[in-house]
């Protein structure tokens, strides 16, 4: 695949600001469950006004791209697998791996990710949406499959191509089937952004890192809705560990499905 030069100019030409978060220093495992059950949206952080969603054509389909961030991965911080869990932000295009450690919650890893072509909670098969959930009713990993030889036909003229990276982490997202976290072979330019049929894409090297160092069958997975900001425990973790990020979008300024369909085309991906 080849991304036209204008797309790189549009993406690299952004003046990208880096912002942290501010809040209290500590969190307990009980606080994680209690505070997030209300789905509070009280982050005091500064939004990144100079990073925005770009709309383009990816093999004939409208998709969204956003400026990529650096990967964070600290397997040396692991202590207890049983207390490890994933939280994904559909608004900010991140997958976070956390671990409860006594009186603290620790960020172990962060990856860029891509979600479905359309925003909103999945309602039915083929609606091109990624399901979301809450901390009190999370999804979970039910299988970890070798997907290195798997192919998929997106109906865009490329035929059946390798599309999943090395692993497919199947999620229990009842009543919806076939949703998982996987790599992005032949589609890496879509990460971070919106381009999938419902699954969550990571860069190929990141799905390897996630599988090798953090993921396990039974692991809890939370996918936040597009209008949900940082959860209270996340704000404290970012402050305590001094986590910087390129993307923290104001939910009132992100693109709706209607705006995505009407937006001018800013990049085009071809074979």
Image: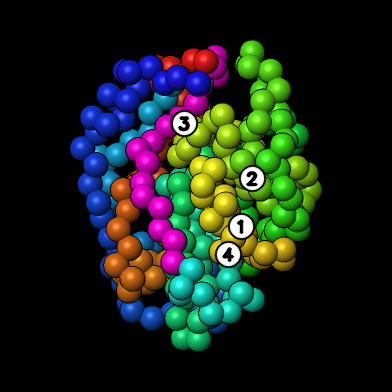
The mark lying in front, picked from 3 and 1, is 1
Q: Is residue 72 magenta?
A: yes
- Judged left or right of residue 67, residue 145 is right
- Which residue is under mark 3? 189
Numbered badge on residue 166: 2
- Distance (Cα) linking label 1 and label 2: 9 Å
Which is more toward the observer, 94 or 24?
94
- Distance (Cα) linking label 3 and label 1: 21 Å
Circles 4, 1 touching at the beta carbon (< 8 Å):
yes
The image quarter containing residue 266 is top left
Which is more toward the observer, 12 or 44?
12
- Which residue is under mark 4? 214
- Which residue is under mark 1? 211
Taking the spot 45% from the left edge, 39% from the top edge, the residue there is: 192
Query: Where 264 falls versus 108 (above or below)?
Result: above
The image quarter containing residue 176 is top right
The mark lying in front, picked from 2 and 3, is 2
**SS at badge 1:** helix
x, y percentage for residue 210?
Answer: 56, 57
Q: Is residue 64 magenta?
A: yes
Label 2 crowd bin: few (<14), some (14–19), many (20+), radius 10 Å = many
Taking the spot 72% from the left edge, 66% from the top edge, the residue there is: 218
Tell which circle, 2 or 3, labels the residue nearer the N-terminal end: 2
Query: Where 96 falls versus 197 (above or below)?
Result: below
**SS at badge 4:** loop
User: In this view, which residue lies farthest toward the front?
Assistant: 149
Give the magenta part as a residue range: 59-74
- Judged left or right of residue 204, residue 181 is right
**SS at badge 3:** helix
């Amino acid at each position: 695949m080849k991304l036209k030069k204008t797309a790189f100019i549009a993406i690299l030409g952004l003046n990208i600001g880096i912002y942290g978060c501010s809040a209290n220093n500590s969190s307990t495992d009980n606080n994680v469950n209690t505070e997030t059950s209300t789905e509070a949206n009280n982050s005091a952080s500064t939004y990144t006004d100079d990073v925005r969603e770009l709309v383009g054509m990816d093999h004939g389909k409208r998709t969204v791209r956003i400026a990529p961030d650096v990967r964070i991965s600290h397997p040396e911080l692991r202590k207890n697998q049983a207390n490890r869990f994933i939280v994904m932000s559909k608004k900010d295009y991140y997958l976070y791996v956390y671990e409860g450690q006594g009186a603290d919650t620790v960020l172990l890893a962060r990856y860029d990710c891509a979600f479905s072509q359309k925003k909103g909670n999945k309602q039915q098969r083929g609606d091109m949406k990624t399901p979301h959930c809450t901390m009190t009713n999370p999804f979970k990993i039910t299988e970890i499959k070798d997907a290195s030889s798997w192919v998929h036909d997106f109906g865009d003229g490329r035929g059946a191509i390798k599309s999943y990276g090395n692993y497919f982490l199947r999620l229990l997202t009842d009543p919806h089937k076939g949703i998982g976290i996987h790599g992005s072979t032949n589609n890496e330019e879509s990460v971070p952004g919106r381009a999938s049929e419902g699954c969550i894409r990571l860069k190929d090297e990141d799905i390897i890192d996630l599988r090798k160092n953090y993921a396990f069958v039974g692991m809890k997975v939370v996918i936040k809705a597009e209008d949900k900001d940082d959860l209270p425990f996340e704000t404290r973790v970012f402050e305590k560990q001094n986590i910087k990020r390129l993307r923290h979008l104001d939910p009132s300024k992100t693109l709706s499905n209607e705006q995505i369909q009407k937006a001018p085309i800013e990049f085009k991906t071809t074979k």
